[in-house]
């Protein structure tokens, strides 16, 4: 059903969704390849991608690791530790897309967005994000910003972040950062037919099902973890309280294909125009 939902949405929105003629290798940076088990995993930041990257390191490590949780989180994000599909020749890419089992994990788009915001803009340690994006957001979205705010970029409000995302200038200037880019643009589900669409809401169950299909379910399980800081629906509702209905409507438009494609209904807290 999830797979058909993607296909139907792609078909119904073909004007929007197939804008991209053909994929180029550069479009495939998020597709992690495991040759030993013939798997391709498209990682979506803020949808358990750290744990899935850890699992992919175990799967491709040929015995180097056995417990995914012994791999430090920052290690899982070192790009050299995993091979991605864009590193292959065109014939090799096509062969793998045809014959490997392809999967991705998705999450309610606005919950993912709030998760990205909380992680990148409210944590003091994320100075690279504050410098790279925070300063730009404050410069554009905050009237009478202090010199300190413009220099540090470490106190971006959620309303400012939303205003930045819906600003046409932002999208013309450069692609969204992967943490808030649409799943549709990261994983190209209208061009690549995924065999499995996992959901964050049923993360453990779906992940273990993937591992079972990959033939490793007997010795590898998805790490169970109760993250106390995880972004919930209630938190997301809170964050959206201060967003004007005009901005909510524009933001929904940006993420609309993700909502439709992965069968997430319009959140009840939205005041759409």
Image: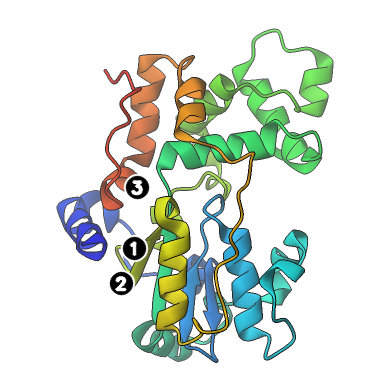
Q: Quadrant of residue 145?
A: top right
When asked about the image quadrant of residue 151, the answer is: top right
Residue 84 in percent (x, y) is at: 57, 76
Q: Earlier in the sequence, mark 1 or mark 3?
A: 1
Query: Where 102 sits versus 43, above or below?
Result: below
Q: State whether residue 225 appears in this view.
A: yes
Callout 1: SS: loop
Q: Is residue 194 above or below residue 148?
A: below
Q: Tell me the number on the disc at residue 258.
A: 3
Which residue reaches farthest top?
144
Could you give the CA–CA distance between mark 1 and mark 3, rounded to whole angstroms? 10 Å
- On residue 269, the disc is none
Which residue is more in the foreground, 87 or 120? Answer: 120
Residue, x 58% and y 47% (percent of image)?
177
Decide if residue 24 is in sight here: no
**How packed is label 3: few (under 14 Cα within 10 Å), some, or many (20 or more)?**
many
| Percent of width and height locating residue 48 | 55, 56
Q: Residues within 10 Å of mark 2 (few under 14, many from 20)?
A: some
Residue at point 55% right, 40% down?
173
> Relative to 80, is 203 on the left or the right?
left
Tag 2–tag 1 contact (CB < 8 Å): yes
- For label 2, the residue is 193
Residue 189's disc is 1
User: How far apart in space, not on screen, are marks 2 and 1 (Cα)?
Assistant: 6 Å
Q: CA distance from mark 2 to mark 3?
A: 15 Å
Crowd tier of the residue under label 1, counting other residues whose Cα lies within 10 Å: few below 14, some 14–19, many 20 or above:
many
Quadrant for the C terminus, please. top left
Residue 88 located left or right of residue 241: right
Query: 202 or 161: nearer the eye?
Result: 202
- Horizontal arrangement in the rendering, residue 246 relative to residue 127 (left or right): left
Q: Secondary structure at mark 2?
A: loop
């Amino acid at each position: 059903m999830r797979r058909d939902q993607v296909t139907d949405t792609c078909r119904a929105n073909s004007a929007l969704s197939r804008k991209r003629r053909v994929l180029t290798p550069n479009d495939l940076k998020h597709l992690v390849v495991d040759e030993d088990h013939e798997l391709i995993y498209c990682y979506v930041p803020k949808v358990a991608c750290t744990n899935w990257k850890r699992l992919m390191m175990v799967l491709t490590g040929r015995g180097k690791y056995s417990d995914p949780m012994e791999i430090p989180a920052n290690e899982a994000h070192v790009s050299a530790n995993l091979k991605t599909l864009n590193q292959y020749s065109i014939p090799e890419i096509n062969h793998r897309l045809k014959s490997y089992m392809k999967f991705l994990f998705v999450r309610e788009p606005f919950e993912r967005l709030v998760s990205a915001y909380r992680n990148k803009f409210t944590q003091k340690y994320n100075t690279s994000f504050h410098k790279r994006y925070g300063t730009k957001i404050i410069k554009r979205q905050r009237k009478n910003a202090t010199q300190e705010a413009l220099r540090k970029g470490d106190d971006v409000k959620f309303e400012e972040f939303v205003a930045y995302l819906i600003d046409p200038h932002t999208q013309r200037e450069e692609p969204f950062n992967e943490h808030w880019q649409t799943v549709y643009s990261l994983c190209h589900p209208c061009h690549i037919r995924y065999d499995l669409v996992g959901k964050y809401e049923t993360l453990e169950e779906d992940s273990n099902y993937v591992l079972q299909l990959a033939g490793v379910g007997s010795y590898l399980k998805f790490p169970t973890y109760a993250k106390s800081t995880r972004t919930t629906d209630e938190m997301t509702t809170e964050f959206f309280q201060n967003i004007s209905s005009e901005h909510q409507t524009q933001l929904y438009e940006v993420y609309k294909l993700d909502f439709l494609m992965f069968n997430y209904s319009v959140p009840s807290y939205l005041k759409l125009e």
